[in-house]
Image (tube, rainbow, N blue to C red):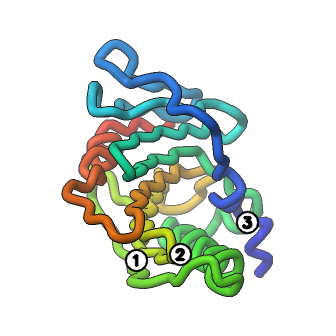
């Protein structure tokens, strides 16, 4: 199977942008795109740094002291027409396998970080089933704890699906007292995917 043509890997959309962006408040925390909408917890330090493009990519960031938190959201197209007949679970497994492979090839094998505690599961959030993967990446500069969640709207015949990636960077020799992953869960509870 030629995985590289099945999906657009998440890694291709990860961009380093300067500045925090627009602060999310109760007046602007609902984001409406062509194929999905979400609501971001208001007045919690989240900033919209990037939104739009053909993949309807949304990047939300939050920085508290030395800690950096990100939510990356997007619509991913199933590029291989034959894969559209696969089940939601099969597509999710393919995507998670591709992400794991990219992390190993681009990070672990190049000595950038060690990948630990990779786990896959299914979660029900807001009445929707998400195919999840969590992991920890450790490097000399610190620890990145992350989770990936995929929502496929149909059991079969998916032409696109929703991808949500949450990460928190903890610098070396520091201790994170509060995770902001519950904020990602609140965003996923609000998800409307069309």
Q: Secondary structure at mark 2?
A: helix
Q: First in sequence: mark 1 or mark 2?
A: 2
Q: Is residue 14 left or right of residue 65?
A: right
Q: Position of residue 166 (x, y in %)?
A: 42, 55
**Residue count near mark 1 (Cα–Cα under 10 Å), binned few <14, some 14–19, many ≥20:** some
Tag 1–tag 2 contact (CB < 8 Å) = yes
- How far apart are the alpha carbons under marks 1 and 2? 9 Å
Residue denoted by label 2: 93
x, y percentage for residue 163? 52, 53
Residue found at the very far top of the displayed protein: 27
- For label 2, the crowd category at 10 Å Cα-Cα, with few meaning under 14, some 14 to 19 and many 20 or more, is some
Residue 132 visible here: no
Q: In which quadrant is the N terminus drawn?
A: bottom right
> Quarter of the image holding residue 74?
top right
Q: Nearer the viewer, residue 114 or 36?
A: 114
Taking depth in this image into account, of 119 and 93 the one nearest to the observer is 119
Residue 104 placement, left or right of 4: left
Q: Quarter of the image holding residue 145?
A: bottom left
Please give the label number shown on residue 6.
3
Compared to residue 88, the image places residue 48 above or below, namely above
Q: Are marks 3 and 2 in contact (CB under 8 Å)?
A: no
Q: Secondary structure at mark 1?
A: strand
Choose top left, top right, bottom left or bottom right for residue 156. bottom right
Please state the horizontal and vertical placement of residue 30, each as a whole percent of the image. Answer: 39, 23
Cα separation between marks 3 and 1: 20 Å
Pair 3/1: label in front: 1
Residue at screen point 38% across, 34% down: 46
Q: Which residue is mark 1?
A: 120
Q: Is residue 15 above or below residue 40?
A: below
Residue 91 appears anywhere in the view: yes
> Residue sitting at 39 percent across and 17 percent down?
28
Give the mark, 3 or 1, whose residue is nearer the N terminus. Answer: 3
């Amino acid at each position: 199977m030629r995985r590289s043509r099945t999906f657009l890997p998440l890694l291709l959309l990860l961009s380093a942008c300067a500045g925090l962006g627009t602060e999310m408040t109760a007046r602007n925390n609902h984001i409406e795109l062509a194929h999905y909408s979400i609501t971001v917890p208001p007045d919690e330090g989240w900033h919209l740094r990037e939104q739009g493009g053909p993949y309807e990519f949304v990047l939300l960031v939050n920085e508290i002291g030395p800690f950096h938190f990100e939510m990356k959201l997007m619509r991913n197209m199933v590029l291989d027409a034959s894969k559209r007949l696969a089940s939601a679970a099969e597509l999710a497994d393919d995507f998670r396998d591709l992400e794991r492979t990219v992390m190993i090839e681009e990070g672990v094998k190049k000595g950038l970080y060690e990948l630990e505690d990779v786990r896959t599961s299914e979660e029900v959030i807001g009445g929707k089933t998400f195919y999840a993967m969590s992991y920890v990446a450790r490097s000399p500069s610190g620890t990145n704890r992350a989770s990936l969640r995929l929502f496929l709207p149909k059991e079969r015949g998916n032409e696109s699906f929703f991808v949500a990636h949450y990460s928190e960077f903890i610098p070396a020799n520091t201790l994170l007292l509060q995770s902001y992953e519950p904020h990602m869960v609140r965003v996923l509870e609000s998800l409307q995917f069309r």
